[in-house]
Amino acid sequence: MDFGIATFVTDEGIRPDALGIALEERGFDSLFLAEHSHIPVSRDTPYPGGGELPRVYYRTLDPFVALTAAATATRDLVVGTGVALLPQRDLIHTAKEVASLDLLSRGRFVFGVGVGWNREEMRNHGTDPATRGRLMDEQLEALSRIWTQDEAEYHGKHVDFDPVYSWPKPVRTPHPPVYVGGESPAALARLRRYGDGWLPRPDTAPETIRSVRADLAEHGKPGLPVTVFGAGRDEKRIEGWAEAGADRVTFLLGTKPEPATLATLDQLAAIAAKYRN
């Protein structure tokens, strides 16, 4: 397997360009960054991890800006969103951001997407939490058209626009790989239909990975890449994911200043070295 890092880049931690350099120096192949546009002051939606919402959620840099900094400071590092909250995003701006980052990174961008969990955050963007999954499905279809057609149009229930021009086009054809996050039935249906890769969370058992890969093969997507997202240091779990055919594991990296971050990366690199391809 390959190994990467999933993290929150904030104004209080290591800079993304320095982080990218440090990852390449230690043999990590990828960097996936989280996204939250803001956190509403009044919030009833519980934090999925339980307890108080961690400080990093309030202070995330824009992932496309941060990943551009990491990409321009590195040569081979894969840069990805983990995950972009697509239902909260303007579709046409997102199409241009993805294509621009793919161009500037020379084809090293992976577009990880998810529906999100913070309902108040969604509503501030004009997104109805009840229909965000259906909105995202239409967004993925429409994005593909913008990236691959000179005059793109889309007419759906949630996304609707007449023909548009939009350049640049992505470097990779037909477009950067779309990695779908989540393990729910709706997420797996989305993965079968639109996904170029899967981002399961670290509580996903190896048997589930085997089952999903078998299902994908039955639906004409054999060998779809699997990146376990935000893993800890449990080596038995890492061994299990490797045996189940996962292609990459990303360690969840805490957000700290540069010296502390580099020390942690040294520890994670030592684990990765045992299992790297």
Image (cartoon, grey):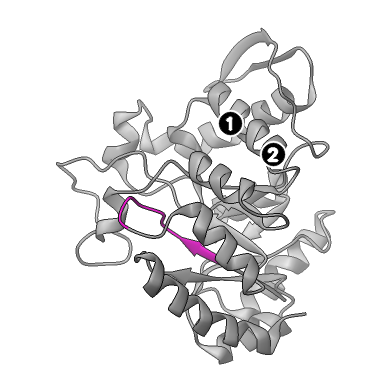
Main SS, magenta region, reads loop
Residues at discs 2 and 1 in contact (Cβ within 8 Å): no
Between residues 151 and 115, which one lies in front from this camera angle? 151
Q: Is residue 45 in view?
A: yes
**Looking at the image, residue 128 lies above or below residue 245:** above
Q: Position of residue 75 (x, y in %)?
A: 71, 54
Sequence-first tag of 2 and 1? 1
**Looking at the image, residue 77 lies above or below residue 235:** above
Q: Position of residue 185 (x, y in %)?
A: 56, 56
Q: Which residues are magenta?
A: 5-12
Q: Amino acid at mark 1?
A: Glu
The alpha-carbon separation of the residues under discs 2 and 1 comes to: 8 Å
* Residue at point 69%, 66% (across, down): 212
Q: Is residue 200 in view?
A: no
**Residue 97's mark?**
1
Q: Secondary structure at mark 2?
A: helix
The 10 Å Cα crowd at callout 2, few under 14, some 14 to 19, many 20 or more, is many
Is 9 inside the magenta-drawn segment? Answer: yes
Q: Quadrant of the C terminus?
A: bottom right
Between residues 45 and 189, which one lies in front from this camera angle? 45
Q: Position of residue 108 (x, y in %)?
A: 71, 49
Is 68 inside the magenta-drawn segment? Answer: no
**Looking at the image, residue 218 lies above or below residue 253:** above
Q: Quadrant of residue 144?
A: top right
**Looking at the image, residue 29 lies above or below residue 277:** above
Q: Secondary structure at mark 1?
A: helix
* Residue at point 30%, 49% (across, down): 59
Name the residue at the top extreme. 162
**Residue 19's mark?**
none
Q: Amino acid at mark 2?
A: Asp
**Residue 102's mark?**
2
Q: Position of residue 214 (x, y in %)?
A: 77, 68
